[in-house]
Image: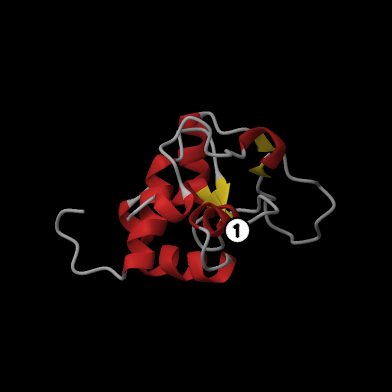
Amino acid sequence: MGGVEELPEYAERVLEVAELIPPGRVMTYGDIAEWLGEGGPRQVGRVMALYGGAVPWWRVVRADGHLLPGHERRALTHYRTEGTPLREASRTGGGGGAELPRVDMKRARWDGAGAPSGGEDAHR
């Protein structure tokens, strides 16, 4: 990864998986941890928060499909550009502001099919 200072090995592996996710598809934090066979959703989320700016971060999402707080508008622009399946927001949320759609997890979730082998052998 050019120009990036020494990343912890786990962070490097998380970012490599994020880069494999095709446009218009997503993986959850837990999916990536499972793919790697190590860590969990919180560890993946921490890596994405600290180092994820250089990879397609919008393709790594919460399991419920809600957009990343504070980055909703930027993520939505990427989703619409890439044709990521979205579910329109319910009108029942009493938030007062415009309700945002969320990722349609049934249609957008990527299982890694067609990607180089993940898991234990991915980076060794």
Q: Is residue 83 visible?
A: yes
Relative vertical location of residue 36 with respect to residue 45 in this rendering, above or below: above
Q: Is residue 56 visible?
A: no
The amino acid marked with disc number 1 is Gly
Where does the image place residue 113, in percent across and percent down from the top left?
A: 53, 33
Q: Residue at x 54, y 36 (%)?
A: 25
Relative vertical location of residue 34 with respect to residue 9 in this rendering, above or below: above
Position of 112 compared to 66: left or right? left
Position of 48 compared to 124: left or right? right
Q: Residue at x 58, y 52 (%)?
A: 31
Position of 40 compared to 97: left or right? left
Q: Residues within 10 Å of mark 1 (few under 14, many from 20)?
A: many
Q: How many marks?
A: 1
SS of the residue under disc 1? helix
Relative vertical location of residue 79 with respect to residue 46 in this rendering, above or below: above
Name the residue tied to disc 1: 30
Q: Nearer the viewer, residue 114 or 88?
A: 114
Furthest-right residue in view?
A: 92
- The C terminus lies in which quarter of the figure? bottom left
Where does the image place residue 116, in percent across and percent down from the top left?
A: 40, 37
Q: Which of the colour schemes (rainbow, by chain, secondary structure, one colour) is used?
A: secondary structure
Q: Residue at x 56, y 62 (%)?
A: 69
Relative vertical location of residue 75 with respect to residue 93 in this rendering, above or below: above
Where does the image place residue 93, in percent across and percent down from the top left?
A: 80, 56
Where does the image place residue 105, in percent across and percent down from the top left?
A: 68, 42
Q: Residue at x 39, y 50 (%)?
A: 122
- In which quarter of the view is residue 110 placed? top right
Position of 113 compared to 56: left or right? right
